[in-house]
Image (spheres, helix red, strand yellow):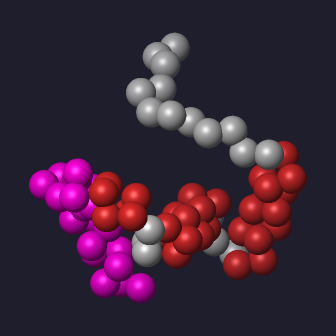
């Protein structure tokens, strides 16, 4: 099996449980919940700007721009 090319953080069991129940409450997929929570928490940080500049020519940045417009 191939190894992941990206860092995969470990999340505490408690937070996984919280996320699971919040996902059910909102009736959304876990990936959508995580994307929304992380975007809302990070979009005003310096790291967001660094990543945006770093990826400005890639489709990732264009996808993020589209998501911001959709919200």
The residue sitting at 45% across, 33% down in the picture is: 6
Q: Given the current orientation, which residue lies at the most extreme left position?
A: 57
Residue range corresponding to the magenta coloring: 52-71
Judge left or right: residue 41 versus residue 11: left
What x and y, as percent, mark residue 27?
A: 69, 75
What x and y, as percent, mark residue 71?
A: 41, 85
Report if residue 31 is visible in the image. Answer: yes
The residue sitting at 18% across, 52% down in the picture is: 58
What x and y, as percent, mark residue 29?
A: 62, 64
Q: Give the image quarter of residue 61.
A: bottom left
Q: Give the image quarter of residue 10.
A: top right
Q: Given the current orientation, which residue lies at the most extreme top position?
A: 1
Q: Is residue 34 above or below residue 9?
A: below
Judge left or right: residue 17 versus residue 36: right
Viewer-closest of 40 and 36: 40
Q: Is residue 2 above or below residue 62?
A: above
Viewer-closest of 46 and 54: 46
The residue sitting at 48% across, 26% down in the picture is: 4
Q: Give the image quarter of residue 48.
A: bottom left
Judge left or right: residue 58 versus residue 35: left
Report if residue 59 is visible in the image. Answer: no
Viewer-closest of 18 and 32: 18
Q: Is residue 34 above or below residue 58?
A: below
Q: Main secondary structure of the magenta part?
A: helix
How many marks the image carries: the answer is 0
Judge left or right: residue 61 versus residue 71: left
Residue 59 colored magenta? yes
Q: Is residue 30 above or below residue 23?
A: above
């Amino acid at each position: 099996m191939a190894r992941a090319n990206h860092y995969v953080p470990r999340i505490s069991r408690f937070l996984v449980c919280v996320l699971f129940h919040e996902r059910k409450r909102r009736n959304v997929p876990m990936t959508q919940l995580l994307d929304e929570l992380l975007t809302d928490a990070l979009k005003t940080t310096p790291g967001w700007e660094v990543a945006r500049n770093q990826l400005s020519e890639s489709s990732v940045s264009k996808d993020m721009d589209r998501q911001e417009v959709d919200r």
